[in-house]
Image: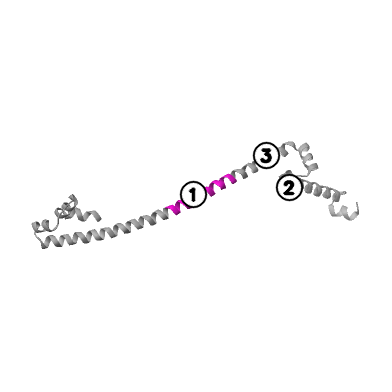
Amino acid sequence: MTEVDQKASGTPGGGLLASLINFVFLSALVFVILWNWDGFWQTDIGPLTRVQQSVFPVKYNEEQLKVSRVQNNNQLIEQIERRVNRYEIAAVEAQKAAREAQAQLSAVVSQENEKCRYYDTALRMIDLLTRKYSEDELKRTLSCTSPECEEILMSKHQAYEVCT
C-alpha cells in the first residue's frame, strides 16, 4: 500500500478494507436483488436451474409453486372472462327483447287508446240521443241485443269507467 493510500484511509491497509466492504456490500445487494427477482427463479437456463435446485431447494420449490398458482389464476381469469362475456351477450339480448316488448306494448296501448276514443264518442252520441228521445222512443230506435248495451243505456257511469 502506498503512503498516500494509508494517509487517505487513516489506517495501514485501510484502502483494502474499504474495497472489501464495498465488494461485500455489492455482493449482498446483488444477492438480494437476485433472490427477490422472479425471473431469476423461473428461468429456462438448465445449469442455473440445477444450481438453484441443489443449493436453494426450498426457495426453488416456492418459486415454482408461484408459477403454478399464476397459471391456475390465469385459467380462472379466463373462465370468468368467458362467463362475463356470456352474461354480457345475454344482457344485450334481454335488452333487445325488452325494447321489442316495449315497442309492442306501445303499439297495443296506441290501439287501445284509439278504441277508447271511438268508444267515448259512441257514448257521447248515445248521451245526446237519450236527451233528444224519450226512453220508449230510444228503446224502439235502438234494439239492444246484449247485456252490455242495456248497461250502457241504464248506467252510463259504469260505461264511462271502462276507458279511464
Query: In the orientation shown, which residue stands out farthest toward the right?
Result: 2
Which element carries disc 2, helix, strand or loop?
helix
Please tell me which of labels 1 and 2 falls first in the chain.
2
| Label 1 – label 2 distance at C-alpha | 49 Å
| 10 Å crowding of disc 1: few (<14), some (14-19), many (20+) | few
| Label 1 – label 3 distance at C-alpha | 37 Å
| 10 Å crowding of disc 2: few (<14), some (14-19), many (20+) | few
Which x, y percent locates residue 60? 73, 39
Please tell me which of labels 1 and 3 falls first in the chain.
3
Q: In this rendering, does residue 37 appear at all?
A: no
In the visual, does 18 lie left or right of 106?
A: right
Which quadrant holds the C terminus?
bottom left
Q: Say which of marks 1 and 2 sits in front.
A: 1
| 10 Å crowding of disc 3: few (<14), some (14-19), many (20+) | few
Mark 3 highlights which residue? 65
Which residues fall within the magenta stretch?
78-97
134 or 53: nearer the eye? 134
Looking at the image, do the residues carrying marks 1 and 2 touch, with CB atoms under 8 Å apart?
no
Mark 2 highlights which residue? 33
Q: Amino acid at mark 3?
A: Leu
